[in-house]
Amino acid sequence: MPANSTPPFESYVDGILAALLRHPERPALVGADGRTVTAGALHDEVRATATGLAAHGVRRGDSVAFLTGDRPEAVVARYAANLLGARVLFLGAGMSATVQAEIVASVDATVLLVDPACQAAAGALLARVPVPAVLTLGTPLPGTAVDPGAAPDAGPSANPDAGPSADPDADPAADASADRVRPEDDWCLRFTGGTTGTPKGIPLAHGPYRQLLDRLAGRLRADAPPRALACTSLAHMAGILADAALLAGGTVVLRPGFDPGDVLGALERERITDLWLLPPMLYELLDHPTAAGTDLSALRRLFYGGTVASAERLRQAAEAFGPVLHGWYGQTEAGNIAEVGPDGHTVTGPGGRITAGRPDPGVEIEVRDPAGAVLPAGENGEIHVRTPMVMSGYWRRPDLTAEVLHEGWVRTGDVGHLDAAGYLHLVDRLKEMVIMVGGHVYPAEVEQALLTHPAVAQCSAFGVQRADGSEELHVAVVPSAVGPHPDRPLVRAWVTDRLGAMYAPATVHVLDRLPLTDAGKPDRKLLRTTLGGSGGR
């Protein structure tokens, strides 16, 4: 290489493959069924699968759609596609077949990768939109088209550690193209929203993602090789944590989904050091009867985020789990924005809400009024951010891009303020605001107040439109094991006492469990649809 030339860009997959070869005998992935994939085997399967995908015509710039669960073969296939320079997109199980088809058509997907357990969903999707190649995880490449009427496979058909595979000694870059992955290439198209119409596609570039993982992996490996638990979708934050753990020379333990008892058992049994959860899931861990007797001594970091968290419940979590809580605030459009570590959980804002932390390295935050003027410390407004991971724009939606992105600044749609010490405090989503007689209410404010009541384990507040077009506030409540029954009079009195009569919900719904979106957040849309006209119980 000439002295004045720059080294070629190495993607996050290049970094992970190099890390896997340093200790090829170590366990890299532990599947939900208990089988272990060594680092060396994972390395070989990724390269072999990349060669197989290249044989199916996958090239740099193509789109590969995933209709898969959290299994080792899906991890292999994602790395293989990204190694070739193709972007990946995940079709959430909670999406209808019509929405999935619209997404696949909008990205011109060249390959659909299907989990054997998702055959029926694949059939419904393919009945609406054709895809040039349809491959089944766990079978050797070249794959065969999915037969919508076929029974799902029990699992991988040949090698128990195999995903779609081919010759492990082949060079996928040579098979596909001499054109290497570039920093500006998309590694992922993440779809978000969708409460009205098709979800918005957000391209995520290789360069910023590699920088993020390098920083996170450095933190994870600081003590010893990490052991990360993935019990939520790998298409979201659990996938980022898994990538960083493998890049740091660690192990990723996969679970079939979030079940508080199962997660607590895995934390103890697998000596987990790192975990990502949404706040409602964290609360379920706290309330599980086995929590007090679970050995969590290996846990070093419990990351949480995605929704506003309760200061009272986080205080309980810190007492139960120790100084391991790390709150992440970010958005797909902008990446990580701020973090609050264990020593920052005593910092609270109005109403006792926990801070979202201080800006991450390279992040700028401004709080602006509706006219775009920057507000002084302590005043609420819309949060605008400029970050190293800011999106280039929504996928093929210049209209939406113009609304959200301006001169590198992202309008987050979140309401909050910065305090004099530089801590960010969130109030709620701008669009979740409920217009009430006499003013407006942010549901998160009501949730924060209710979560301080000992009878309330979880809750979600949401607006419901009346027949005359006006709005009223409803609350869904999951009772705790202690305290009085959280009926309407109790809930209204508690909220009124702390926030005022305008904030008191018109209706209270008592549920056994809150419904969650694919991303693990309380599903306000579903609550609004199913409970909006049903009255209280």
Image (spheres, helix red, strand yellow):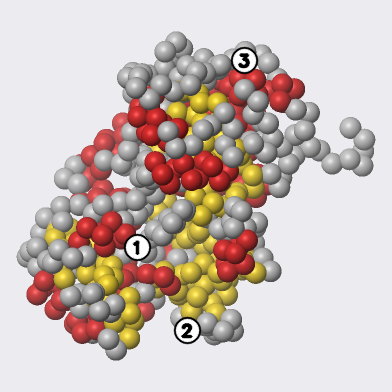
Residue lying farthest bottom?
A: 438
Asked which quadrant contains residue 168, the reply is: top right
Q: Position of residue 270 (x, y in %)?
A: 35, 31
Local packing at callout 3 (Cα closer than 10 Å; few below 14, some 14-19, many 20+) is some
Residue type, label 1: Ala
Residue type, label 2: Glu
Residue position for label 2: 379
For this view, does 33 lie left or right of residue 128? Answer: left
Instruction: Identify the mark nearer the N-term, 1 or 2.
Output: 1
- Closest to the observer: 35 or 155? 155
Report, in whole angstroms, how far the alpha carbon at label 1 lies from the one at label 2. Answer: 21 Å
Instruction: Identify the mark nearer the N-term, 3 or 2.
Output: 3
Report, in whole angstroms, how far the alpha carbon at label 3 lies from the one at label 2. Answer: 58 Å
For this view, does 115 lie left or right of residue 524? Answer: right
Please name the residue shown 15% across and 56% down the image: 511
Total numbered badges shown on the rendered structure: 3
Please name the residue shown 19% across and 47% down the image: 288
Q: Position of residue 376 (x, y in %)?
A: 54, 85
Residue lying farthest left?
A: 484
Q: Position of residue 358 (x, y in %)?
A: 52, 67
Determine contact: label 1, label 3, CB under 8 Å: no
Residue position for label 3: 168
Residue position for label 1: 309
Figure check: 148 above or below 478? above
Asked which quadrant contains residue 266, the reply is: top left
Determine contact: label 1, label 2, CB under 8 Å: no
